Image (cartoon, rainbow, N blue to C red):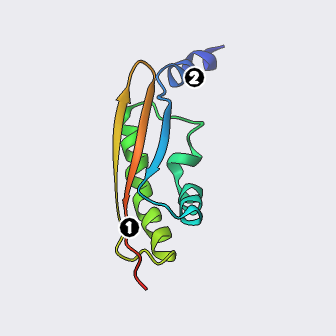
Amino acid sequence: MKALFLLAPLFAFSLSYEVHFVGLQDPEALAAMKEVSELVSLQERPPASINGLRYRAASDLPALLRVLRSFAYYDASIAFDIEKNYPNNITSIFWCSVRLHL
């Protein structure tokens, strides 16, 4: 019974969120980015705070850049923004600036 009370705060204060990738038109590269993103794969286990969400998004940046380089987007840059849409939905947006170099 005590275990239930210890787990209750974890569920009560978790943040639900959505992830959107903006600026990338290549469907294969976009699918690969979603596949390596921990922010996407851990969406069913939301963090307890906005700082946890920021940490997840920042942790994704190196892997997302590797994916873009593997698709020949060598001069790509990625940034993220977290928008708070109250009462209960937070959106994380990755902004991708890509140029194709051959």
Q: Residue at x 41, y 64 (%)?
A: 62
* Type of amino acid at the residue the image marks with label 2: Leu
* Type of amino acid at the residue the image marks with label 1: Val
For label 2, the residue is: 7
Q: Residue at x 48, y 43 (%)?
A: 19
Q: Label 2 vs label 1: CA separation?
A: 42 Å
The front one of 62 and 2 is 62
Badge 2 density bin: few <14, some 14–19, many ≥20, Cα 10 Å:
few
For label 1, the residue is: 98
Quarter of the image that includes the C terminus: bottom left
The front one of 12 and 61 is 61
Q: Residue at x 62, y 17 (%)?
A: 4
Q: Residue at x 58, y 63 (%)?
A: 32
Badge 1 density bin: few <14, some 14–19, many ≥20, Cα 10 Å:
some
Quarter of the image that includes the N terminus: top right
Asked if residue 82 is positioned above or below residue 66 in the image, the reply reads above
Expressed as whole percent of the image width and height from the top left, the position of residue 54 reads 36, 43
Q: Is residue 90 left or right of residue 4?
A: left
